[in-house]
Amino acid sequence: MDRVAVIGVGQTKYEKGKRETFSELVYEVVTRALEDAGITIDDVDNIVSVSSDFWDGRTISSMAIQDAVGAFGKDITTVEGDGTFGAMYGAMRILSGNFGVGLIVAHHKGTESSMSGITNTSFDPLVERRLGLDAVTSAALQARRYMDRWGILEEQIAPVSVKNHGNAKRNPLAMLPMDITVEDVMNSPMISTPLKKLDCSAPTDGACALILAAQHEAKQLSTHDKRVWLNGVGHCSDAFHLGDRDLSDTRALKEAARTAYAMAGLEPSDIDLAEVYDAFTYMELMWLEGLGFCDDGMGAEYLERGVFDFGGKLPVNPSGGRLSANPVQVAGLACMAECVLQLREEAGERQVEGAKTALAHGINGMCGQAHCVWILGK
Amino acid sequence: MADWKDEVEEIVFDGKICVPYSWTVGSTLSKWYGMMRDNAEIWANRCPSCEMVFVPPRKKCIYCYKDMNDWVKLAGTGVLETYTVVQHPEPGVYPKEPPFVYGIVKMDGADTGLVHFIEGVEPDKVKSGMRVEAVMSKEREGNFMDIECFRPIE
């Protein structure tokens, strides 16, 4: 099978209250990604744009930014979900043999509308939407179930926030670099038990673009130091209704991870760093367990031992993670961009020494209904 | 942060999207809500293949993809599987003033959980594993709020 490489990345700084329009954010990251790859828009033969209509406040939001992605006269398709799913679609298009160079672009503004109102509309209007459930209250139901099942205390999930906000201090693109303690997390306002303000990511604005290329084009257009290969990918979805799942179970993630590791011919112990979707503190631990980095229920103990610290055996979210910037549809693509920078040894102060293989993870749907796992390598 | 604002006075448009919908709830949920409204009963349906019992009822089993025409009446009692005490207000989204409680109830006789409000107990006394029962609304209109809430069984 042909291989697909990432040959360029472009990101905005992740911030709240960005004063650029959706199109301006997209222009910024596409321009950066093209410059990074050393190519022009004429070298790109297809585009996948990722957005969400309710967040943008317009239908067919993906069509509205088509000038900005340089799609005029080109083949473009769109994804409503996390950026990792857009990247998967883009890689599949290249592997079909019909395309050589693809641009994957995601944009998101969380601070121009209502996170609660928008995520409430993801619930079934025929059943539980009337209850007023949203992203944080449903996550709180999952957190409680996960913590009850494994006997994990609030003090044991709080260090994820301390670690990730601390990591963000080394990332100039992160929104919330912070020096905080477990006590600060515990004393932050309760949002929905057991989740406190510092257990939750905050609405964020930003955009991210990746340029993917087939093996032939990648070698023609780009140099060795700029190329990062997509060696494995897996995707799996769980049931839609929260009550149909045991919310402490990561069966969909386990299947996505199994597929990605098998495709890459690797095991969890081969991974040098991971960027996982920590929209909430407890999620990072659950996802690390589902990805096979430790047994179920053991995430908090590994965290306490420093395994996932920046200087640990497996640095997790060296970028600062979603807790430090969560531009929803962009978030998983930003995970991939961080892995690319790390593998190219361009991660500056947060460079994980000797990183050869990295894992990026994105989720879609409430409480991690669907997961996409990428394994990237030099 | 954008530096263009030093030179140009920014203009911001406020907006709101309000679009009416009339969603059919379909054959399965129409039957479910009808029995709730007319008889104050909560029913579920069972997969003929794996025998999983679903509430809310489904047209097809999510595991076996088989049609589910075997309906069973639930007693209305169950166990609280997980819960959260909502402390932060979201006016216009949450229908109640915090603090209030959401929970997922595994109803006796069913294999899936039902998300709803947990009431009739101080929020800080709610615990996973509590026995609870459904409280049906007095005025029932054939929708999910015909179940008013679940409350602990004394």
Image (cartoon, rainbow, N blue to C red):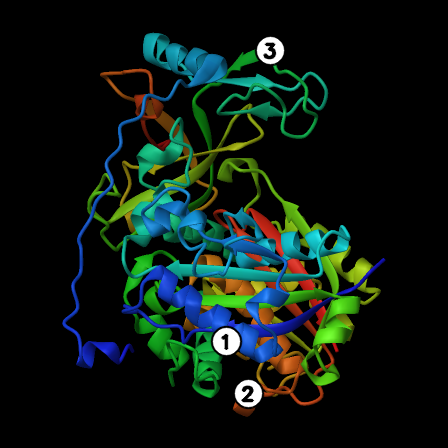
Which residue sits at x=61%, y=49%? A249
Q: Position of residue B94 (x, y in %)?
A: 26, 43
Q: Nearer the viewer, residue A49 or A123?
A: A49
Crowding near the residue tagged with mark 2, few <14, some 14–19, many ≥20 C-alpha atoms within 10 Å: many
User: Is A141 placed above or below A203 here?
Assistant: above
According to the picture, the residue beneath numbered tag 1 turns out to be A32
Q: CA distance from mark 2 to mark 3?
A: 58 Å
User: Is A24 placed above or below B84 here?
Assistant: below
- Relative side of A328 to A245, left or right: left
Q: Is disc 3 in the same subunit as disc 1?
A: no
User: The residue marked by circle 3 belongs to what chain?
Assistant: B
Element marked by disc 3: loop
- Relative side of A42 to A142, left or right: right
Q: CA distance from mark 3 to mark 1?
A: 57 Å
- Relative side of A291 to A133, left or right: right
Q: Is disc 2 in the same subunit as disc 1?
A: yes
User: Is A191 placed above or below B90 here?
Assistant: below
According to the picture, the residue beneath numbered tag 2 turns out to be A350
Residue A160 seen in this snapshot: no
Q: Position of residue B55 (x, y in %)?
A: 51, 25
Q: Nearer the viewer, residue A330 or A164?
A: A330
User: The residue marked by circle 1 belongs to what chain?
Assistant: A
**Split into 4 quadrants, where in the image is the N terminus of chain A?**
bottom right
Q: Nearer the viewer, residue A280 or A156?
A: A280
**For discs 2 and 1, the disc positioned in front in the rendered view:** 1
How many labels were placed on the picture?
Answer: 3
Q: Earlier in the sequence, mark 2 or mark 1?
A: 1
